[in-house]
Amino acid sequence: MPVTDLFSSDSDEQHHSDAVAQVIKKEMRSAGGSIDFARFMELALYAPGLGYYSAGRRKFGAGGDFITAPEMGPAFARCIARQCRQVLWELGKGDLLEVGAGSGALAAGVLSALAETGPLPEYYFILELSAELRTRQAEYLAQTVPHLAQRVRWLDHLPPHGFYGVVIANELLDAIPTQRFRWNSGGPQLLHVASEHDHFCWRDVPAPDALAAVLSARMRPSARVSGYSSEVNLRAEAWIQSIAETIEAGLVLVIDYGFPRAEFYHPDRSSGTLMCHYRHHAHGDPLVLVGLQDITAHVEFTAIAEAGRGSGLSVLGYTSQAAFLLATGLTEQAGNLAQDDVKAHLQLAQEIKKLTLPHEMGELFKVMALGRGLQGPLSGFTLQDRRARL
Ligand SMILES: C[S@@+](CC[C@H](N)C(=O)[O-])C[C@H]1O[C@@H](n2cnc3c(N)ncnc32)[C@H](O)[C@@H]1O
């Protein structure tokens, strides 16, 4: 069944999607007929009050469109807290900063775990683009961790240089608008989006020389063939550079689905990594259900590592989510549950499976740590470190 059949055409959703489409078409007209895909994705996801992340529709969890690791239960947050704890101890002080905090579940879980063991950060900052999600996060934190909520502060932009602590970016980079390209006999073409007969469609535009040079350097000849299409997310790289300027000492922990460059631009991955989610259906067409569906692309981790190194951060670890979580005590969490609490044990077992099994989130999701001013090896990468594959 096509994903568009999942919603009825006279519904509120249709009206909402039409309103988002109008905003996009208006911009296309003033741009001369088309806009580049990154701008299309930005408007579809973040147009103020209308975009997928900016409007009121439920996105996360069973009643939404997709489930992220912090939404499955508290186990993921406890592991992240353990890595944060090591850094906060080593620095002797510090804050946490979560960028793109979704429902607020990770913030609540990390703060609760640190409240049990110490040290608590002075502040847990949240930088969130969506005003609607900020409100939800504040409500969620006030309900679930009222005694810790006063440590949470929302920021409008990244703090200036001088940040000590850990920046957490879980499933953030995949949501940063990406450029798309398609190779043809004339070289790489940048994919634009236009509107024809009231439907959005793709349009090829010659890639600017600088972008063509980047792609030629990053892709091997066997992938640079007619018809090969993929993504390149220069904004995600710029985001890493901005974070590097912020951090005086500490870590940025990137958790997301993706691959090193050789796998990302593998000749066999010839239609890229773009994915859309609508009511737990995953598909590959970002030009439909505009404003109603999530649009994401996998992360090219080699580019992220290079952006970090180029801005003075060291790549302190890179591994699979499974290896990271097992190294930060995922399975030990059962020891903290009451022995006769069968339900809690079953829930934890379920969560562990989803987070670590290779065909669930365990292998596709990776964790990368970029840092400055830290000495010891990070606990999350002691089981396995894949930096050599970047
Ligand atoms: C896929 S969701 C992940 C949410 C959450 N981290 C989780 O794992 O459940 C992406 C989040 O990033 C936010 N976001 C995207 N780009 C951002 C940016 N440049 N700065 C701050 N937040 C951003 C979105 O509004 C959304 O909350």
Image (cartoon, rainbow, N blue to C red):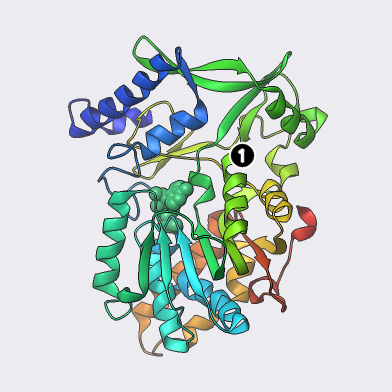
The N terminus - image quarter: top left
Residue depicted at 25% across the width and 46% down the height = 56
Classify residue 304 as left or right of residue 83: right
Q: Does residue 190 appear anywhere in the picture?
A: yes
Classify residue 49 as left or right of residue 337: left
The residue positioned farthest toward the top in the image shown = 197
Q: Position of residue 120 (x, y in %)?
A: 45, 82
The residue positioned farthest toward the bottom in the image shown = 339
Residue depicted at 41% across the width and 76% down the height = 111
Name which quarter of the figure residue 298 lies in: top right
Identify the element where label 1 is drawn: helix
Q: Nearer the viewer, residue 134 or 16?
A: 134
Where is mark 1, residue-wise? Answer: 234
Task: Please tell me how crowded label 1 is: few (under 14), some (14-19), or many (20+) other residues with Cα within 10 Å.
Answer: some
Q: Vertically, is 132 above or below 70?
A: above
Q: Vertically, is 305 above or below 106?
A: above
Q: Position of residue 289 (x, y in %)?
A: 34, 30
Classify residue 112 as left or right of residue 259: left
Q: Nearer the viewer, residue 7 or 40?
A: 40
Three-letter amino acid code of the residue under disc 1: Leu
Residue depicted at 61% across the width and 80% down the height = 91
Q: Does residue 63 appear anywhere in the picture?
A: no
Q: Position of residue 265 (x, y in %)?
A: 71, 37
Name which quarter of the figure residue 217 lies in: top right
Q: Position of residue 39 (x, y in %)?
A: 47, 30
Total marks drawn?
1
Q: Vertically, is 339 above or below 385?
A: below
Q: Vertically, is 275 above or below 378?
A: above
